[in-house]
């Protein structure tokens, strides 16, 4: 089958002879339609994050159509359009047993320790292939995964009433947080140095964050020291800092602010299976949230190299489309 294969850091080769996946019991084979690119993928691409071996297929935000089912899965699922939940908790370790499968110690993750999604066909555990609502646009379907990250962060933030929120960073994740929070009726302000990204957040209903305004909740999506410091400085007494972005540099914590203001710092790691994907599918089915609004560029598989090279400077999400999979 065709696949975009990382052959060396910074180089993706599109090949025709990548081995097809084999469908094991309780799994399905999904013909991939679209794959979204996020910061994790860019880190794997440029070599700042390591892959198990080269050549290696990356990509983990995907949707497509079931074309084969393994033993134990009803053949009636063949033909279903699905979004893939690309983190497979073991269901046996302590975090899994304690209701936090996002923190699984033996998680299977396509692109990180399992073959990624930039391929025509991928094997997925059947319970991680979520049936999409009829008629959902491809660009919404490909953004279900990052929307699940955003909605899990909102759930964990345990917001009360219509608390006003600060979103720091307006990459795709920050934009999805703005969109989700606005859809839930929360006033939202954004801090983002890049003018085009900031403009996209404002178009989704975010206000500029005026100097001196304090917020009960801040979502930090940039993963940068500057972003973390800015979020901490804007929190009201008893405020809650929700860390969603992951960067390579530590965020310095000013104890004069954190202690004297009684702040809470909460890390929000991806999403918990199955509750957060179920809630995300429900949200896009209700039409209240259209995550595809963050898609800013799309490329065919043949141009995977160009897509990855340009993605970090695109204000929004870059998507790679494969020929197979089928639209709505
Ligand atoms: Zn991602
Ligand atoms: Zn586990």
Image (spheres, rainbow, N blue to C red):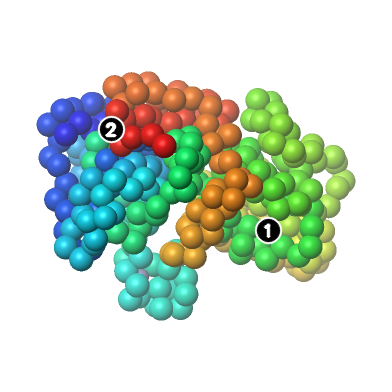
Are the residues tagged 2 and 1 within 8 Å (C-beta)?
no
The reply to whether residue 245 is visible in this rendering is no
**Residue that badge 1 annotates:** 241
* Residue in view at x 66 percent, y 43 percent: 179
**Residue that badge 2 annotates:** 324
Residue 7 percent across, percent down from the top left: 22, 32
Q: How many marks?
A: 2
Residue 77 percent across, percent down from the top left: 29, 54
Q: Residues within 10 Å of mark 1 (few under 14, many from 20)?
A: many
The quadrant holding residue 11 is top left
* Residue in view at x 16 percent, y 63 percent: 71
Mark earlier in primary sequence (2, 1): 1
Residue 134 percent across, percent down from the top left: 45, 45
Numbered disc 2: secondary structure: loop
Numbered disc 1: secondary structure: strand
Residue 161 falls left or right of residue 5:
right
């Amino acid at each position: 089958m065709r696949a975009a294969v990382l052959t060396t850091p910074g180089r993706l080769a599109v090949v025709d002879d990548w081995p097809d996946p084999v469908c094991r019991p309780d799994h399905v084979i999904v013909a991939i339609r679209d794959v979204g690119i996020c910061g994790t993928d860019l880190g794997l691409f440029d070599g700042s994050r390591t892959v198990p071996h080269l050549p290696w297929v990356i990509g983990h935000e995907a949707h497509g159509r079931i074309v084969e089912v393994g033993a134990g899965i009803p053949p009636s699922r063949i033909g279903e359009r699905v979004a893939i939940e690309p983190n497979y908790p073991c269901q046996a370790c302590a975090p899994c047993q304690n209701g936090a499968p996002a923190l699984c110690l033996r998680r299977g993750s396509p692109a990180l320790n399992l073959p990624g999604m930039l391929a025509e066909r991928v094997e997925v555990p059947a319970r991680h292939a979520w049936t999409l609502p009829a008629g959902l646009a491809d660009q919404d379907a490909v953004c279900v995964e990052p929307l699940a990250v955003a909605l899990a962060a909102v759930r964990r933030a345990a917001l009360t009433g219509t608390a006003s929120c600060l979103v720091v960073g307006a990459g795709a994740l920050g934009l999805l947080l703005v969109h989700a929070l606005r859809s839930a009726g929360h006033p939202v302000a954004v801090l983002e140095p890049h003018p085009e990204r900031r403009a996209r957040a404002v178009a989704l209903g975010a206000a500029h964050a005026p100097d001196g305004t304090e917020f009960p909740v801040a979502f930090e999506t940039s993963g940068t020291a500057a972003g973390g410091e800015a979020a901490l400085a804007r929190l009201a007494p008893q405020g809650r800092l929700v860390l969603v972005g992951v960067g390579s540099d530590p965020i310095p914590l000013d104890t004069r602010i954190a202690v004297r203001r009684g702040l809470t710092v909460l890390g929000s790691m991806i999403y918990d299976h199955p509750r957060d994907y179920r809630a995300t599918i429900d949200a896009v089915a209700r039409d209240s949230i259209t995550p595809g609004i963050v898609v800013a560029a799309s490329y065919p598989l043949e141009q995977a190299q160009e897509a990855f090279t340009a993605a970090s400077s695109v204000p929004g999400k870059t998507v790679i489309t494969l020929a197979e999979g089928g639209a709505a």
